[in-house]
Image (spheres, helix red, strand yellow):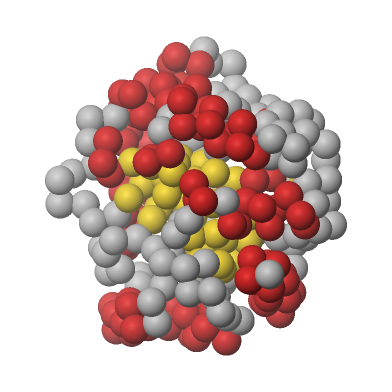
Amino acid sequence: MNEKLFLGAHLSCAKGFHKMGEEALAAQMNTMQFFLRNPRGAAAKALDPEDMSAFYALLRDNGFAPVIAHAPYTLNPCSPDERIRALAEEMFADDLQRMEHIPNNLYNFHPGSRLKQPLETAVTEISDMLNRLITPELHTTILLETMSGKGSEVGRDFHELRAILDRVKMPEKVGVCLDTCHVWDAGYDIQNDLDGVLTEFDHVIGLDRLKAIHLNDSLNPSGSHKDRHALIGQGEIGFDALSRVVIHPALRGLPFTLETPTDTAGHAQEIAALRKSADA
Ligand code: FE
Ligand code: FE
Ligand code: ZN
């Protein structure tokens, strides 16, 4: 196994965090992503501190790259509805507290849907929330995810994320997670011009802010703004283009996480194929 290559997938913590870590190990993963709560609802049961410290030890003892906790999909920090924004902040704060059980990992969120609000208002609301939640004591790096631009999603291009980052007071605590399906759907041609897209990312945001990759194929053509993930090699981006992402020197050492529509056995196969191609 190429140890410098960190590959994993989105897994379920329903049976516990340490169990999830063992599932990752069995599938040759050395990173992973998970929800800290039911992704569609706010309700979250209390975490078991012993389970969390066993999980943390497993990550450390097996040389995992940083792992990603994904915020609930319902979380919308730029909703025009004040109550929905307040709920987003509450869930976000609670998740960040949970993350303190496993310090030095990543918390990824979708910037949200602004509906009829102007972009500027949305950017202000998102960054103001971050500035209220981020403290010097926080041990987690927060990630803004690049979005496909369906509906009124904020983060449809690198400039929208940059606008948020520019307003964040503790920039060392906030980075970006690049989702290959989303940027492709947003219109960035990572199939024919990966170098150009990464150069553009570097100019607008800075590659030093890039902390993780979501590796997904897309059911739709570039520019479609759809956000429908496909199995690696079974979508419009294709296996070759995605395996070039995995070995790109500018992305070396980053955690790559699959969010493809399959189970852990399927993810293990995709990871094996990507590792094989990276070693070739
Ligand atoms: Fe996401
Ligand atoms: Fe994603
Ligand atoms: Zn997606």
Where residue 122 appears, as percent x and y from the top left, is 46, 22
Residue drawn at point x = 59 percent, y = 57 percent:
247
**Residue sitting at x 46%, y 32%:** 202
Q: Residue at x 67, y 31 (%)?
A: 188
On the rendered structure, is 224 left or right of 112? Answer: right
Q: Nearer the viewer, residue 230 or 98?
A: 230
Place of residue 221 in the rendered image (x, y in percent of width and height, measured from the top left): 83, 36
Residue 166 visible from this viewpoint: yes
Q: On the rendered structure, is 183 left or right of 62?
A: right
The residue at the point 78 percent across, 46 percent down is 237
Q: Is residue 127 above or below residue 279?
A: above
Judge by depth and name the residue closer to the eye, 135 or 183: 183
Locate residue 267: give its quadrant.
Answer: bottom right
Give the vertical position of 196 relative to 245 (above or below).
above
Report x, y in % for residue 158.
52, 28
* Position of 85 relative to 181 (above/below): above
Give the left or right position of residue 35, taking residue 9 as reference: left
Q: Quadrant of the C terminus?
A: bottom right
- The x and y percentages for residue 105 are 35, 60
Q: Quadrant of the N terminus?
A: bottom right
Q: How many marks?
A: 0
Q: Could one spot residue 23 in this view of the protein?
A: no
Corner quadrant of residue 193: top right
**Residue at the outermost left position:** 136
Above or below residue 57? Residue 131 is: above
